[in-house]
Amino acid sequence: MAKDLYESRQMYQSPIIFYILIPIGMVILFFLIDFGIKIYNEYTLKRDTQEILKIVMESDAEDLKSVAVKEFERRGYETDDVSVIERDNGILLVNYKSYFSMIGEIIGGNKSVAVARYFGYYDEHKELVIEEYGIEDEELDETTDDDAITIPAT
């Protein structure tokens, strides 16, 4: 009886399926690793930018950019692209970080860049508020009264 069970099983002798699945699995693994590296770099840059903006806002120094650059250098970032923009109601801190991307290098040689933009200000209770500053906010800031639409009163 045991012999009948063993003989009724279908066994494959050819490893063709594995030859097909291994390259597909490697491509999927490359994409997963690349996506993980992207998420990690964006998270660490955003976390560090928030902490540095808090330090800059609490600083009494005249040159706020030098404070931000010094803190970014201490944490190991390149400081060529650090931007500190002082506005009437707060400070905008922007930093970029390029990182290695396997898929980008294989396909087109594009540099992958993580961007962190944060705006810090003090609210009416004199508490520090740090918000992410998006591209939509930049577009709103660039609008002028000439772009406004006026509707005549009836």
Image (cartoon, helix red, strand yellow):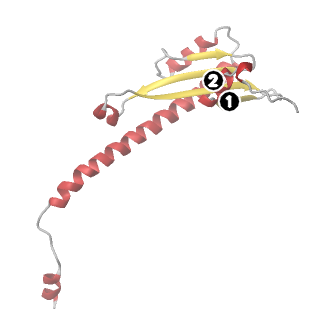
Could you say which quadrant of the image residue 132 lies in?
Answer: top right
Could you say which quadrant of the image residue 83 lies in?
Answer: top right
Q: Is residue 42 visible?
A: yes
Q: Which mark is residue 130?
A: 1
Depth order, front residue of 135/47? 135
Disc 2 element:
helix
Report whether 114 appears left or right of 14: right
Q: Mark 2 belongs to which amino acid?
A: Leu
Please tell me whether residue 1 is drawn above or below residue 150 in the rendered image: below
- Quadrant for the C terminus, please: top right
User: How many marks overall?
Assistant: 2
Residue lying at 17% horizontally and 79% vertically, measured from the top left: 9
- Quadrant for the N terminus, please: bottom left
**Callout 2–callout 1 Cβ contact below 8 Å:** yes
Disc 1 element:
strand
Work out whether mark 2 precedes mark 1 in sequence or the reverse, and give the earlier one.
2
Please tell me whether residue 29 is drawn above or below residue 145 in the rendered image: below
Depth order, front residue of 126/93? 93
At label 2, counting other C-alpha atoms closer than 10 Å, the crowd grade (few under 14, some 14-19, many 20 or more) is many
x, y percentage for residue 29?
A: 32, 47
Residue lying at 63% horizontally and 26% vertically, measured from the top left: 139
Could you say which quadrant of the image residue 51 lies in?
Answer: top right
Q: Which residue is mark 2?
A: 53
Q: CA distance from mark 2 to mark 1?
A: 8 Å
- The residue lying furthest to the right in this view is 154
Q: Mark 1 belongs to which amino acid?
A: Ile
- The residue lying furthest to the front in this view is 154
